[in-house]
Image (cartoon, rainbow, N blue to C red):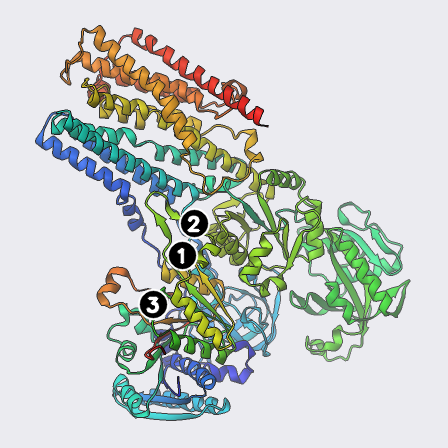
Amino acid sequence: MYKKILSAVNEHLNSVIAARYALNISRACGAKLYLCFVAEKGMSAPDIGKAEDAMQRLFSEAREMDVQVQSISTTGQPAKEIKEIVKKEGIDLVFVSARRADVERRFYRATTAREILLKLPCSVALTRVVNMGRTHPGKILIPLKARIDHVHERAYFTAKMAEGFNARVFVFHAPKPVTSFFHGEIELTQMEWEKRMPGDITDFMDHITKYGIDIEGRLLPGRVARTITIEAAAKRHGLIIMGATGRNLLSSLLRGNPVERVLRETTCDLIILKPVHKDDK
Amino acid sequence: MINNLAREEVFRFLVTSEQGLAEDEAGKRLIESGPNEITGVKKISWLKRFAGQFTHFFAILLWTAAGLAFISEYLHPGEGMFTLGGAILGVIFINGIFTFIQEYRAEKSIEKLMLLLPFFVKVIRNGKEDEVPVRDIVPGDVILLSEGDRVPADSRLVDSNYLMVNNSSLTGESEPVPLSSKPCKGELIESGNIAFAGTTVLSGSGKAVVFATGMGTEVGSIAHLTSGVEAGSSPLQKEIVKVTRIIAFLATVMGIVFFLIGHAVGKSFWENFIFAIGIIVANVPEGMLPTVTLALAMGSQRMARKKALIKTMTSVETLGSVTHICTDKTGTLTQNRMEVKKVWTMKKKESEVDGEGGVLPPLQNNDVTMLMKVAYLCNNTKIVEGKSKGEPTEVALFNAAAPLFKDPGPERVFEIPFDSDRKRMTTVNRVNGSVLVFTKGALESVLPLCASIFADVKEIPLDGPMREEVTAACNSMMDQGLRVLSFAYKEIEDTGRGVSQYAPTDSNLESDLVFAGLIGIEDPPRPEVSGAIIKCHEAGIKIIMITGDGNRTALAIAREIGLVHDGALVIEGHEFSKMGDRELKEKLLQKEVIFARMTPKHKMRVVTVLKEEGARVAVTGDGVNDAPALKKADIGIAMGITGTDVAKEAADMILLDDNFATIVSAIEEGRGVYENIRKFVSYIFASNIPEIIPYLAYVLFRIPLPLTIMQILAVDLGTDMLPALALGAERPSKELMKQPPRDPKERLLTAKLLGRAYLFLGPVEAAAGLFGFFYVLMSGGWEWGNMPALNDPLYMQATTACLTAIIITQVANVFACRTFRESVFTIGIFSNKLIFPGIALEILLQLFIVYHPWGNRIFSTSPISAGIWLLLIPFAIFLFAAEEGRKLITRSIAKKGQ
């Protein structure tokens, strides 16, 4: 599915860590890795130097890991340039690191991250780096909503990421609590919850199992974003992979945006995946 | 992981160098990573939570009623609707404020976690040493650590000069942990080259590279869990929501139905409207919530007298519904007063220590003297103001051995501190010109290092059968509940290279040792614990011991205190870590389960799994990393003596004496509180019937309204409150701790309770009320069909008589509701000291309503003669006698059933 993977590198340490995720999945997929640095107009010479150093380091690391790698350095507006490269090279997946500005702005509006997420014609993995010490996640948390699209690509991405790090995968669903008017919230045991596992999630788990990855599923009712970050912190997950939000601005304003909240509150690294590959029939 | 990397790779990985970051780079990284501070998660503001108390379903219903009353006053002035509207608003505010008081709890755990970080940190930037505020630390910063420093952020050691840290703020284990700069395999949290934010440097110095700051650190993760974990509503809160919704629904339906009936029988819209509002007000037990809150407050005061300090009021009742207690062993089940009980040497075998308090008498036996010498010198206990201070196990060894060795001890030249992974410590001492190595630790850690054994003042080779004998002796002592330590020594050559010759990497230091013997230390169980455990078993509460001790010691102690019998399942920490949730759930279903060799971080998982299976869990804890489990549990119990501030802030209850038996007393009190709530709910609900029936009679039989809405509120929010509170102070009955925990599905309002209140007690009160009303009306010459004016003195006297009848029968009802099955005479008429003052105040309030002009004006009453009071008293006597008769029948049926 992923033959060509691109990772955007810049002068920030976050982008280097994000690129290492790209490196590992490239190795697991047997894909070619493109390291791409776009120098923006007005960028200082020391910053350009740092970014170029980072490119060199990552290039060497990729070679050490036997990953086929190519460096691309150019100038211009990052989102636009990356889009051009994606089209020209036929890139399947782009890794880009979330910056603090992306995290702090509501709905990361008017940020490069948002532009890349929305405009690239390929799949995008927006990476938020929180802990630079946990470079190899041993446990990966996959929060899923009841209805998901691109099941096959999500499963492939997750499986390859797990393979890259030799990690275990934990699928997690935070449904709304069961309530009735007179009884308020009705408490269900974990067994009772597990019987309510949505079909799409079961389908997703079946796909992951096909790749030979160790997987566990779990449901815990509660407020979605908070339940996800609590689960990740309590079970010491090293990485969360979740889908990009499907909610528009108005819907996010009215119903909240769990992805944005997880992005802000997570205590471990997070990858927000925007898949584009249609499911095989 | 960063702990796996070699020194140079660490710099390369975090894009930094020996010279540290440049200032401008540090500034840029600060913009990207954010300040290094513990913030917790964003919570719903207290203002929003306060507003929530006035916008839920029931409140909206009351707002609507108040609004309609004000509209009614505007359109039909002079019918008292303005006062009614005001009264309903009063009800909304009283209920809202009381609920908010119950739910609101100041969150201070995060503040305490923030205090773990220092204010300033020594860093290397641009190749120079500098001191910067802790919030400016960024990933890639090279920090300098020395004795007494608190670590500012999670960092990887790149240089270590005998650096020792105290990780107790994270792990709960207070023994010093040596840190080196060498790569380590395995989990980051267990790594020997990582200094974690919030921990303290005990000795030595080092240089480290920061890799995580703020909420990305381990302590940040604890803060996230502590502030983000929601224990959910307490069982009582859930019950109250259910009760109010059911009542509100019933009241509304009744209001609408009788509005329509009134319309059908030809009453005017406004008459029907007043009636509908009246029926809603009469149905809603307005005084219930304030009474519940006050009863919980009284319960928490009683618990405080028993040394259980309650922080969240609703926890009082939650305690009563607990099904599982996950408890620590040391200090909670035991006294944390370690004493040397037994020694074992190859020659003398196992022998008791006869001295008082584990102190050895002067010894003639040289083998034991050698053993005690190792225990004395391989020991960090200090004498401060004449008292031994240190880790309790070491203090016990020191106290036992010190009398044998009068001098302060030979010079200590080197130490490898105790490490929970290595499970041993080693010291090097200069004794009479010789250099000796002394090692103590767990048998499995020390015995493999020994090549010979000290027996009869000789060092003889340690062969296979001897090793087996030592292991058997150790097992035998552990089976007696003793914590067993093994001791070894050897003499080494002094090469004259100073301390460097004893570097911890020198494996020769801890090899070819001479095994000296074993010492068994006892931590005696608290004497009251066995009784408390029996009580728990009778009460159907499962106790799960979670301890850091080995499985044999844990099992022996558990047997001694009666916690387990044969066939108990013991799960060790390493097995626990490998277990999936499903397997753990199955294991937890076993009747008797003990967790041994566990660390505090495992607790949260045990609590989570139990809660997911529908258990109501109480958990004890004292360390910082116990805080998430304390928050997650239904009842988090922090230790008052040994607990950290963070644990105390995260807990719902603090044990002032750290004693397990106090938990059981608190549970008993909690069960009592729930029973008492049911008692006063019966009492309050019984008075709803004499409030509703007059309204029904008013519509159905076209009689004057026997009780006004304000008079209903006088009962619900006035006269009923103090006797109800007195019922909240009833002592727990003896049977309470012989019943299993309350089924979570059991409702506060059961059919039995409602039947008793609505079909038995209530109708008697209604009959009294209507009798009083018609007696006064008819005595004054009223004839059926006449509708007197609202300000007619006769009518006002009649409603006053109705109200008085309700009050008089409610006095009898207080006594009736003191028990469900027992006769009141059995528990003692005077056994609850608050009942009589409560009744006295109830009557005083009624006298004010009936005879004071202000009372008359507010409640539209008029004074009545003493004769009417006397006429109503037989109804009260009948109610009490009938209830005693019912209880007698219930008891005899139950007896026959047995």
Question: What residue does disc 2 label?
Answer: A187
Quarter the C terminus of chain B occupies: top right
Q: Pinpoint the chain carrying mark 3.
A: A
Residue B294 found in image quarter: top left
Q: Using the image, determine if residue B776 lies above or below residue B256.
A: above
Question: What residue does disc 1 label?
Answer: A221
Q: Pinpoint the chain carrying mark 2.
A: A
3 and 1 marks on the same chain:
yes
Q: With B129 as the anchor, is B333 left or right in this view?
A: right
Q: What amino acid is at disc 3?
A: Val
Q: Position of residue A215 (x, y in %)?
A: 49, 70
Mark 2 Cα shell of 10 Å, populated few (<14), some (14-19), many (≥20): some
Q: Nearer the viewer, residue B350 or A155?
A: A155
Q: Using the image, determine if residue B418 lies above or below residue A114.
A: above
Q: Can residue A266 be seen from the camera position used here?
A: no
Residue at image location 58% in from the left, 69% down from the top: B190
Q: Can residue B11 be seen from the camera position used here?
A: yes
* Numbered disc 2: secondary structure: loop
Of marks 2 and 3, which one's residue comes earlier in the chain? 2
Q: CA distance from mark 1 to mark 2?
A: 10 Å
Q: CA distance from mark 2 to mark 3?
A: 26 Å
Question: What residue does disc 3 label?
Answer: A259
Residue B193's disc is none
Pointer 1 with pointer 2, Cβ within 8 A? no
Q: Position of residue A271 (x, y in %)?
A: 39, 74
Badge nearest the viewer, 3 or 1: 1
* Numbered disc 3: secondary structure: helix
Mark 1 Cα shell of 10 Å, populated few (<14), some (14-19), many (≥20): some
Of marks 1 and 2, which one's residue comes earlier in the chain? 2
Q: With A172 as the anchor, is B436 left or right in this view?
A: right
Q: CA distance from mark 3 to mark 1?
A: 17 Å
